[in-house]
Amino acid sequence: MSMKELLAEDCGGRNPLLDAASHITRDQAFRQENLKTKHLSGYGTDELMVREFLEESKLGQEALMRRPPQSFQMQRLLQEVQEIEGSRQNIVQPGPSVSVITRSQPSSQWASEFLETAKEGNWIEEFNSQSNYGSHQGAFQDVWDTAKEMPLASDLLQQSETWATEFAEATSSVNNQRASEWVSEFKNEDIWDKMETDWQRAALDSPMDLPWLEASQSEQRANEYEFSDENPLSNSPNALEVGKQRRAEGDLSNAVLLFEAAVQKDPSLVEGWLLLGITLAENEQDREAIKALNRCLELDSNSLEARMAIAVSYTNEGLSMQACKALEEWIASNPKYSGLINPAGKFSSRKNAESSLLSGELYGRLQDMYTEAARLMLNNEIDADVQEGLGVLLNLTCEYKKAADCFRAALTVRPNDARLWNRLGATLANGGNSEESIEAYRTALNLFPGFVRARYNLSVACIHLRAYREAAEHLVSALNMQASATLPGKSSVMSDSIWITLRSVLSKLERRDLFPDVNNRNLQRLVQEFGA
């Protein structure tokens, strides 16, 4: 809108700007509320406007509070609703319900009306006239004729069986001849010897091309006992007897060297291999002990002492299945109890040979055999070996209370057996009775002061009782015993497990300053600190 239109008047009308001014001047709201502008001195224009706005708002609120309450205008609302209802002209009215129709018209009449409608309708003819079925009927007929000419599945199956019979008859004679040749070749041991020789030659000629064969041969060599490279006692006369004397004195490390010298001079010396394995186990070297004891059993499979000793070493190494096999072989090799073995259920040397997991079936059979052997009580005497084997077996399934009872029963027959006292102490410690186990370990050490394994087990019991200083002293003493025969420039005789345990104890003692001495195997520094 232009300014001219605001100021000038149209014909017969008033000026719009004047109308707006008159509207403001005639505003009834301001007049009714008696709002008057007050001039406040001392305030600027902006502040004055704010003051006026606040006062007007306050007055407006007070006026609203003074107004009498007004009732809701229901009459006006009713009038508006009637006007809205009157404007609806195309609203669909609901029809009668089904019940009304049913009451007013019988069902028979519905059926008659439906049939009459169906008779009058020609929907089938209309569908046929609108569809193209007639144009495709010829194509459908051709497909159907072709399908009828194809052979049935039963005919194909019969034909395939005929082919199979003809093929079998044609090749039966050739197959029988070849099978006979294969069986003859398989039974020929010369072929296997030749094949083994060829594989060995191939591994030597091109080891990079056959790494799996080299790994297999390395594993086989790993199961063989490795002698010390530089044995200062290798030329000792009568090494076996001297080794027995050193072992009795508690000098296990030098006894091991003497027994090695004895079996090197005579590899078929069964007693030498047996004492070597037992002494290695007493010196906390179970892995090497297993190798020596296996060699002993290869030479004498009926050695009961070797069977029991290797079962204990397998248990210490966590090889439960191998321990069970050794315990079963002990029963089978013992003429007193061999009748308890069931040949049909005997443990196979090949089945599960590589597994260390305990078989429930094998364990149950072994437990029954050893329990029956213990009940026999030949000559009304307790068989300490049977009780010892049963105690080892119960340790495999963590039945420590029963195992401890078995070792106590064996000690009634052999009270001066240091190894039995050590096994009793280990069983008590595993069952949570560390305080009681210490007494058993001390008894074993009193009988056999050089018993390194008992000394190590005693340190572990002290750790469980949080006597860390005493544990460190026993560990250093055990290492010092092992180091008495350490070869120049080598520390392999000392057990790694003892060093690892000692490092853990030093951490508990907050003696991290001694960690470098442990890492460098500086035993002299540790002996000065803890004694030996």
Image (spheres, helix red, strand yellow):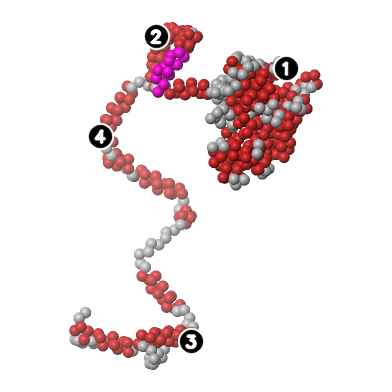
Mark 3 Cα shell of 10 Å, populated few (<14), some (14-19), many (≥20)? few
**Which residue is disc 1 drawn over?**
336
**Which residue is disc 4 drawn over?**
135
**Which residue is disc 3 drawn over?**
66
Lower sequence index among marks 1 and 3 = 3
Horizontal relation, residue 170 to residue 380: left or right = left
Mark nearest the camera among 3 and 2 is: 2
Horizontal relation, residue 135 to residue 363: left or right = left
Lower sequence index among marks 3 and 2 = 3
Q: Are marks 1 and 4 in contact (CB under 8 Å)?
A: no
The Cα–Cα distance between marks 4 and 2, rounded to whole angstroms, is 55 Å
Q: Quadrant of the N terminus?
A: bottom left
Residue 489 at x, y percent in the picture: 53, 30
Q: Which residues are magenta?
A: 195-208
Mark 2 Cα shell of 10 Å, populated few (<14), some (14-19), many (≥20)? few
Mark nearest the camera among 4 and 2 is: 2
Type of the residue with mark 4: Ser
Q: Are marks 4 and 2 in contact (CB under 8 Å)?
A: no
